[in-house]
Image (cartoon, helix red, strand yellow):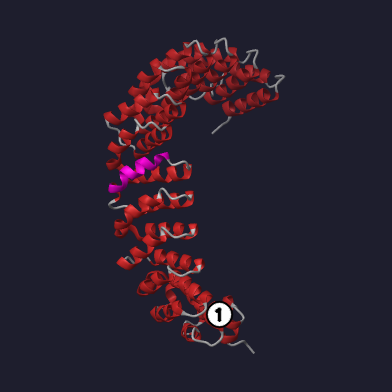
Amino acid sequence: MSATLEQLLRDARIDLVLARIEKESTVIEEVIRNVDNESRSIRFNSIFVLGELGEKSGEKAVHKITEYLNDDDWSIRREAARSLGKIGKLASSSTNELSKCCSEEEESIRLAGVTSLGTIGYVSEEVLKTLRNALKDKSEQVRIEAANALGLLGSEAFEVMPDLMRSISDPSWAVRTTSARAMSGIGKGTIKAIPTLVNALDDKDWRVRYHIVNTLREIGEESIPHLLNALNHKNRVVRKDAVDALGEIGIKTPEIIEKLTSMLKDSKEEVRGKAANSLRSLGKEAVPALIEAIKIANTKMKIVIISAISGIGLEAKEAIPDLISLLNDKKSSVRVEAARNLGSIGIDSEETMIALEKSLKDPKAIVRREAALSLGKIGPIAKKAVPSLLIALEDNKPDVRWRASEALGKIKLNTPEVISALKILIHDECDYVCESADFAIDDITETI
């Protein structure tokens, strides 16, 4: 004989109760009636089941559960608050009573009430007042959930922006982070919060700064004047994150490019690096500025700027002559970076091919290695460099022989001279050179 619904609820067999409801929806009515059961466990589990059903529970369930927000048993009150949140928008009629729960002495009830106000998503003066107060709750977790709930309410919650701005100064990093995220969630009207957001970029916690940058990025163009001003901030963290936000927004005005270029000369290396990265994200329009900057940069910044130019890709072709000139830089680290990155922007460029071919004779093996690697990337034009790559197969450094054989495999010039030279290399003293030569022969001789 199968157990009655009441027995299942008493024994907390929620899975079986839900299975019965799945087969026969009228069981919901019986569950609602059991909310008034004399047994505490049956009342509790009935409320829990209705919450698990979500909107399927229906308005009648909402009204019944709402009655139990005033139950003498604190755990029943908490479960009622949680279940109403799970039911969601359908439970909007319960928000005034839920708001009262948010002033309970028991923390878990306050937490449930605040969380449910956010998931229900109904905006009223009472709800906003409650969540404002919850932002000042003595419990960190309640404050976190209050900020999160306000973010879920969206643009209709605009009037709480000043409260969220104050919460950005909360002692808890989690509250500060959630408050910044909530400001982004509210969206419309966030423009008025921009000055506070920019000032908050010097928060000591990177997670808070991350969300603030994201918020400013989502606000977009209206943030730009404030971010440009922040580039002069005395705090390096603010300058760095302002630079980051400008790059994320992606607007490419001459003023923005000029200002970001000026940050390549910032006193702090991390700011300079972030400026180069932001200019890279702006694409082709930033290339002339990067080219000019590299002419006066120190060695470290030359390397950073070369990488930024390379990140722009084929649209940075106008920088090819300048990168080629850096293949003659007195610092080998700069020559390495130039050789490496010419492979990204110099595709089908004879000028690039000739310069890289010359670099196969560089006194530094690491430069020769990167030149060989890039020759394999620049396309069919590199066939003209095959004689030089064959010479490089005899280099006294295995890394150069390795990359030269790899390049030949990519160029795929199938001649007896190339195949013969690679076959000799299969017996190289260095295992990875042998393997590369073998792969190159396969690549060259493969049939389509």
Residue 117 inside the magenta-drawn segment: no
Quadrant location, the C terminus:
top right
* Residue at (52% x, 78% y) in the render: 73
Q: Nearer the viewer, residue 371 or 114?
A: 114
Q: How many numbered markers are drawn?
A: 1
The spot of residue 298 in percent (x, y) is 45, 17
Residue 242 shows in the view = yes
Quadrant location, the N terminus:
bottom right
Residue 347 shows in the view = no
Give the extent of the magenta segment.
192-202
Q: Is residue 376 above or below residue 113?
A: above
* Residue at (63% x, 13% y) in the render: 395
* Residue at (55% x, 80% y) in the render: 17
The spot of residue 181 in percent (x, y) is 40, 51
* Residue at (53% x, 14% y) in the render: 332
Q: Main secondary structure of the magenta part?
A: helix
Residue at mark 1? 17
Q: Does 165 sit left or right of 144 as displayed?
A: left
Q: Is residue 399 above or below residue 29?
A: above
Q: Nearer the viewer, residue 16 or 126?
A: 126
The spot of residue 378 in percent (x, y) is 47, 23
The spot of residue 314 in percent (x, y) is 39, 27
Callout 1 secondary element:
helix
- Rendering quarter of residue 447: top right
Crowding near the residue tagged with mark 1, few <14, some 14–19, many ≥20 C-alpha atoms within 10 Å: many
Q: Nearer the viewer, residue 326 or 376?
A: 326
Outermost residue, bottom side: 1
Residue 193 inside the magenta-drawn segment: yes
Q: Nearer the viewer, residue 151 or 427?
A: 151
Q: Is residue 398 above or below residue 239?
A: above
Please name the amino acid that badge 1 sits on. Answer: Val
